[in-house]
Image (cartoon, rainbow, N blue to C red):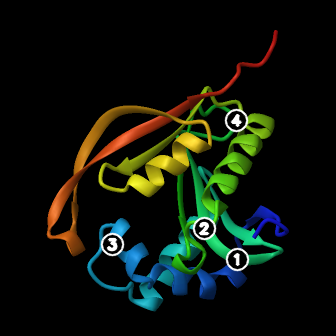
């Protein structure tokens, strides 16, 4: 893995099949709060809608141009006036534990700092998801407050989400 470069590749229609396969992995199903794999055509419709959103930047996490995960950056308003960027991500279980998510989050923060006028970047992570919490902190995020309790179908219970945030430097006058 050390010799391979992790990059964020803008998602397009060609990313759907690998995205669908990742969303069908048991670990992804669990942490996205579902209890079964997505229905393919419903996910395709959702995927196409996400690509068209002006307030969502959608990326494939790639190793040497091969998709191994996904990452979204959601803006609270128009990209030119947004103050917060919320990041969501997933990495294929075949590539988990290799530092890919940490590198992808760092890439996302670099992109946000360079291209978006936001004041902070945030993540919301289910409290029992200790691996994602470690990834967030390695990437420079600080553990914050609980935000809301959400049902996790596969677990048969609800988990609290906790916000992780990193302030972004303001533009100099």
Estimate the spatial distance between the alpha carbons at disc 4 and disc 1, rounded to whole Å. 28 Å
Tag of residue 67: 1
**Which is in the foreground here, disc 4 or disc 1?**
1
Instruction: Name above or below for residue 152 compared with residue 67.
Output: above
The numbered mark, 4 or 2, whose residue comes first in the sequence reads: 2
First in sequence: mark 3 vs mark 2: 3
Q: Residue 80's mark?
A: 4
Residue 171 horizontal/vertical position (percent): 77, 19
- Res 70 label: 2
Which residue is labeled 3 in the image? 30
Cα distance in 3D space between marks 3 and 2: 16 Å
Residue 81 badge: none
Q: Position of residue 130 (x, y in %)?
A: 39, 53
How far is disc 1 from disc 2 in space, using C-alphas? 8 Å
Determine crowd level at label 4: few under 14, some 14-19, many 20+ residues with C-alpha closer than 10 A: few
* Percent position of residue 133, x then y: 44, 48
Instruction: Mark 4 or mark 1: name the one nearer the start of the chain.
Output: 1
| The N terminus - image quarter | bottom right
For the residues bearing labels 1 and 2, Cβ distance under 8 angstroms: yes
Residue for point 67% across, 41% down = 79
Crowdedness near tag 1: few (<14), some (14–19) or many (≥20) residues, C-alpha within 10 Å = many
Residue sitting at 25 percent across and 43 percent down? 148
């Amino acid at each position: 893995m050390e010799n391979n470069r992790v990059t964020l590749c803008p998602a397009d229609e060609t990313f759907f099949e690998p995205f669908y396969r990742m969303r069908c992995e048991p670990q992804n199903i669990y942490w996205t709060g579902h209890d079964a794999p997505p229905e393919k055509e419903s996910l395709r419709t959702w995927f196409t809608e996400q690509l068209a959103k002006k307030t969502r930047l959608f990326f494939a996490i790639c190793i040497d141009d091969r998709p191994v995960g996904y990452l979204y950056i959601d803006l609270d308003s128009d990209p030119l006036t947004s103050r917060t960027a919320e990041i969501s991500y997933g990495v294929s279980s075949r590539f988990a534990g290799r530092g890919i998510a940490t590198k992808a989050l760092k890439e996302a923060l670099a992109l946000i700092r360079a291209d978006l006028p936001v004041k902070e970047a945030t993540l919301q992570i289910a409290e029992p998801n200790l691996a994602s919490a470690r990834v967030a902190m390695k990437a420079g995020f600080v553990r914050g407050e609980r935000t809301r309790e959400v049902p996790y179908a596969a677990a048969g219970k609800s988990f609290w989400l906790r916000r992780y945030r990193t302030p972004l430097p303001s533009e100099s006058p």
